[in-house]
Amino acid sequence: MTIEVEQLSKSFSTGRAKRRTLVEAVRDISFSVEAGERLAYIGPNGAGKSTSIKMLTGILRPDSGAASVLGITPWTHRKQLARRIGTLFGQRSQLWFELTSLQSFRMLGAIFDMSDLQLATRVGELGELLDATEVFAMPVRNLSLGQRMRCELAACMLHEPEILFLDEPTIGLDLLGKQLFRDLVIRLNEERGTTILLTSHDVADIESVANRVIVINHGSVIYDDDVEVMRRSLFTTKRVEVGLERPVIVPEIAGAQLVEHTETVARFVVDTSKRSIRDVVDAILEHLPVADLSIVDPPLDEVIGAIYSQLAVE
Amino acid sequence: MRSLTATMRSAFAEAWSNRSGFWLQVSIMIVNDLVWVVFWVLFFREAGSVRGWDTQQVLMLQAILTTGGGIVLGFFNNARRLGQLAADGALDATLVLPVPTLPHLLVRRVETTNLGDLIFGVALFVIGCDPTWSRIAIYLAGSLISVITLTGFLVAIGSLSFFFGRNEAGELGFHAMVMFAMYPVDVFTGPGRAVLYSVIPAAFIASVPAKLAESFDLGMALGMIGAAVVFATVGYTMFTLGLRRYTSGSAWTRA
């Protein structure tokens, strides 16, 4: 296992003097990650995601529990671990704003004991991979957020880490920037086998990047499975989109709720726990002039929203 | 060592990136220091001497203070900001690097303004402090010990933020130290004077080396070295213990 976490807990005290209270940020979480996995670690604000990552990178010391990252206990051998992992916090920067990224890379190269030749080769590779060779030579203060995030990613990849911890890396990026960033992370994983642990509030990040998801809430792990399994097992509804050959009045279809109807399209939501998708499709084919038909899973944000709502009720 | 040198180089390059601003800030600080020295010269011309201190000694005090203070606040500027960085949770970027945390943090930021102090201090010593070989030795050693004591003190009070979550003590301590170190220690009496030789070691920052330049006293010299060792040890220990209590944060920050 690349990462093993056993009953890790961390509390913070808040408030002042006599009004001090203890808040459990992470409570007895346990999970493991295999080499090469792309894991999304998600949860609402204050769920304990960042605290978990900060413990796994050695920034914070837990109150109790154990963790091993690449066989190293992060908070006792932080510097040793730092040579083998890369971290990118959306709200932290490893770059010097008044300097070019190349100047920051030189400092990081010295920190990671890289020779000038190693550094130049690596910067060249990353410049090509991230399509950022010219961006590296510009002062960081002049970069757009998207360009800066590419440089930040290069900075944390310089020493060829075995694991990348990405804490809300797409925060503030526009749609195009986010998609570019996701593609880059997937390429790093597929081409170099880098293990990815990602936190994000953006469902599209999780859908695009992760092949496994852990949901954490109130400091505890409440769900841990493949993204696809989560989508299928937690949602018993399917969406059926029907392209119509001609405008028609749509009759009532048992087990299917009509949610949208135009002259050319009819969209249904089907609760598969009440009627099978096959029966519904048969009924649609029988009663409507179908030109095209597709069955899709619900969007992941609905799935995650459902998990949170379910927890709130419990 | 290579990582620290590279970090210092980056910090200086950042300060140097705005060259006109760099020289403007340096010049303003030199003028500021000059005004203070002119005040002391005029004061002692009228007063003659105060509790054994005369113009010559006060110029030596100012030279060592601005040299030592200029090095600490110019090249190790985060010593002063450490408490705020800890309270803001801004140490993450350093903690994920394979570097010795405290030294890396200290050299990570250069403050241009205070480099003006350093330049002024050296110039004042050369021009106004009669630099004989023995005085040069005391000036260099005094400045070095001043750097160690001041850095240790600032790190120690800044580290209180780890324990209390706020940095008021750090700011108060910094201002108290700078204010008291600017005056000859002998103008203070009673408990106040004792404080300047202990809790707020302002006496060792400049007054004691300035006195040693006039008449060398082995006991006083050893006391000064002892203070540097104590405050360096206390600062390092408090930072190391405090770091275990570091709580990070989620604000947009940089160290």
Image (cartoon, rainbow, N blue to C red):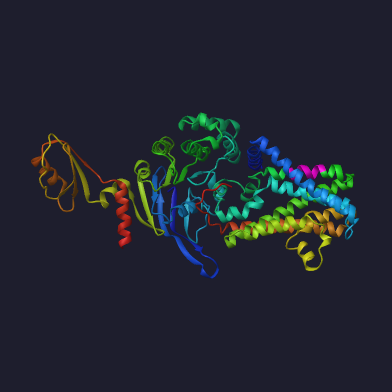
Left/right placement of residue B149 relative to residue A270 reads right
Tally of numbered discs: 0
Residue at image position (70%, 37%) is B23
Regarding residue B237, the answer to whether it shows in the image is: no
Residue at image position (60%, 32%) is A116
Query: Going by the picture, which residue comes out furthest to the left?
Result: A286
Of residue B201 and residue B224, the one placed in the foreground of this image is: B201
Q: Main secondary structure of the magenta part?
A: helix
Regarding residue B218, the answer to whether it shows in the image is: yes
Left/right placement of residue A197 relative to residue B169 reads left
In the image, residue B237 sits, relative to residue B124, either above or below, namely below
Which quarter of the image is occupied by the N terminus of chain B? Answer: top right
Left/right placement of residue A150 relative to residue B228 reads left
Query: Going by the picture, which residue comes out furthest to the bottom?
Result: A18
Q: Quadrant of residue A286?
A: top left
In the image, residue A172 sits, relative to residue B157, either above or below, namely above
Q: Quadrant of residue B130?
A: top right
Image coordinates for residue A59, horizontal then vertical, percent: 53, 52
Check if residue A10 falls in the magenta segment.
no
Image coordinates for residue A93, horizontal then vertical, percent: 53, 43
Magenta residues?
B116-123
Image coordinates for residue A276, horizontal then vertical, percent: 15, 49
In the image, residue B183 sits, relative to residue B27, either above or below, namely below
